[in-house]
Amino acid sequence: MGSQSSFLHFMHRFVFWVLFAMISCFILRVLIVLDLNKRIYNHTPGPCRVLTEKFKGTSGLAFVESQKRVYITLGYGKAHNLTTNTGIAFYNTNRTDGRNQQEIYDLIEMTINWNGNDYQNTFIPTGIDSFSSSNGRVLLYVVNSHPDHQCIHFFQVDNTKLNHRKSICDSSFTSLQDVSVVGPDRIFFTNMAAFGRGWAQVVEFALQTGQGVIYYYDGSKLSIAASSVNAPTGLGYDSKRRILYVGSLIRESLFAYKVEKDMSLEVMYEMMLLTSPIGLFVESKSGDEEGKSWVTTEPYANDGATISASSAIVYTDDQMIIGSTFGRLLHCDLTHAHIT
């Protein structure tokens, strides 16, 4: 009887300490993800200004060199029950077209022709990318983050109007994040987690189960390019080197995948950033040809007073634009280019 009681006492203590270790690990991982141990030192690459704070979210940016336009997705906060309008606008980066000082910082909101499709009331755009053809045609690919209607929408640009071409939707899309174009109607895009939101997603992130997916769409067929990815977020494609960069929210890192000729992905390396990349912008004018050397700089940092929850960036020769998941759109002049 005494030995049985001792065994039960041992088992109770064993189970208690195992559960205590698991809960402690869970709490520690949550604290690490929240970055409560980090301090921000504010700095900018030059004069900065707010382009708009009208919308609850400017979470996606796509730069089209041929048009000198940055396309911006508006109103992501609506996916999280914030009251805001949604849509797509563009900012003209050309400063030599005769506009006055006030007009050069204006955003142009675009009208959308849905061509009879009933998406208008469920359209909450977030990730965005573009394709420019040799004849001047510009196509946009936009992630719809509505909790009940997650899709990728295809548009053609017609001056200040967007014409809806088609959409791809699937029941497996639970937390679409970003899209990257590798050719006309050929795209990679990320699904961050198995659970769309709520405590189930929090637990999934804390346990780091790696249920994220990178999808590939070839214009007609949807396939999984990479599975069991740990919370994939932003995408950036280097067409010169055929490298797809994928941010990881939980691992606070950047994965590099080689895009093979058959469009399959081969892992090249992982670079630890100690911060969670939500949006990526590939600036192909710098860097070595092999893509093996890195120079890490921090041209902008803010403690949240000016902009918080930054989620997208575009970097041109003399301008930088930063989007926010739930807030304003920031524009900075790169007058101190040597620090960038």
Image (tube, rainbow, N blue to C red):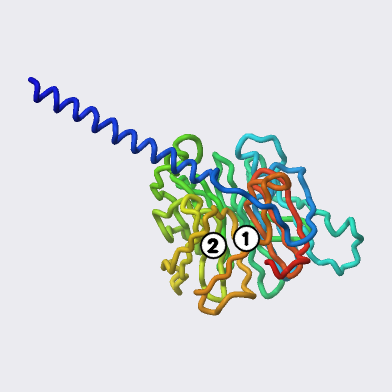
Spot occupied by residue 36 in the image (x, y as percentages of width and height): 55, 43
Q: Disc 2 residue type?
A: Ile
Depicted 177 relative to depicted 255: above or below: above
Residue marked by disc 2: 187
Depicted 159 relative to depicted 144: above or below: below
Depicted 295 relative to depicted 280: above or below: below
Q: Looking at the figure, which quarter contains the C terminus?
A: bottom right
Q: Nearer the viewer, residue 338 or 64?
A: 338
Spot occupied by residue 101 in the image (x, y as percentages of width and height): 90, 59
Q: Determine which of the numbered discs, if any, sits on residue 129 in the image.
A: 1
Q: Residues at badges 2 and 1 in contact (C-beta under 8 Å)?
A: yes
Can residue 181 be seen here? The reply is yes
Can residue 72 be seen here? The reply is no
The image quadrant of residue 135 is: bottom right
> Of all residues shown, which one is farthest toward the top?
1
Q: Residue at x 69, y 67 (%)?
A: 339
Q: Disc 1 residue type?
A: Asp
Q: Residue at x 24, y 29 (%)?
A: 13
Q: Secondary structure at mark 2?
A: strand
Q: Residue at x 78, y 56 (%)?
A: 48
